[in-house]
Amino acid sequence: MFDYLEFSLWFVLIHIFSYMLAGVVAYYVVHKGPYFTGDDPFFNNYRTPDTADWAHVNRWLIPVQIIRGFLFSIVLYPILDVIDGLGASMIFLFIFGLMYVYTELASMVAGPCNLEGWIYFKSEKFSRGKFFCLKMHFEGIFYSLVIASLVSIFLF
């Protein structure tokens, strides 16, 4: 039997760590140029570190991630005992698939290089070079790998 609040607390902490690590790595490896220095209409909607808008990011980043982590954790409550019965590698694959597929690849919110985006975005968003979509998914894949590893090691 799980202590649901303790599970959620640890899940939130693991989520925040994974989110921050993936964000920092992705920023320096992939996103720094296109997100913050281009004139692309999609990317120029981001708040940038060199503007007054960045105060909004600083104020809300952690509170919103606490809420996201908690929401992610409570969705798992009904199946925690089932997940606990899986082996470590299956827990890893389940959490990775859940986080990557549901939050990135198959999200119902259209984004560049997810399935909804492929339907609704103009074709030029998907024709920016051979590895554009791979770069766009780097952060989601990295985040999913980190959180799946930590959850399978520390929570089950």
Image (cartoon, rainbow, N blue to C red):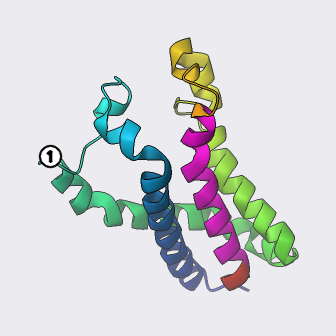
Q: Is residue 73 above or below residue 3?
A: above
Residue at x-position 74% and y-position 54%: 97
The magenta region covers 133-152
Residue at x-position 54% and y-position 75%: 14
Q: Which residue is mark 1?
A: 51
Name the outermost residue toward the left: 52
For residue 149, say whether it is visible.
yes
**Snapshot quadrant of residue 137:** top right
**Snapshot quadrant of residue 94:** bottom right
What amino acid is found at the position of numbered circle 1 in the picture?
A: Thr
Horizontal relation, residue 81 to residue 113: left or right: right
> What's the magenta bit mostly, secondary-structure-wise?
helix
Question: Which residue is at the front of the view, 95 or 72?
Answer: 95
Residue at x-position 52% and y-position 15%: 124
Residue at x-position 54% and y-position 23%: 128
Query: What secondary structure is marked by label 1?
Result: loop
Q: Is residue 43 above or below residue 67?
A: above
Question: Which residue is at the front of the view, 58 or 135?
Answer: 135
Horizontal relation, residue 37 to residue 155: left or right: left
Viewport quadrant of the N terminus: bottom right
Residue 73: horizontal and vertical position, in percent? Answer: 58, 67
Residue 20: horizontal and vertical position, in percent? Answer: 44, 65
Residue 10 in the magenta stretch? The answer is no
For residue 122, say whether it is visible.
no
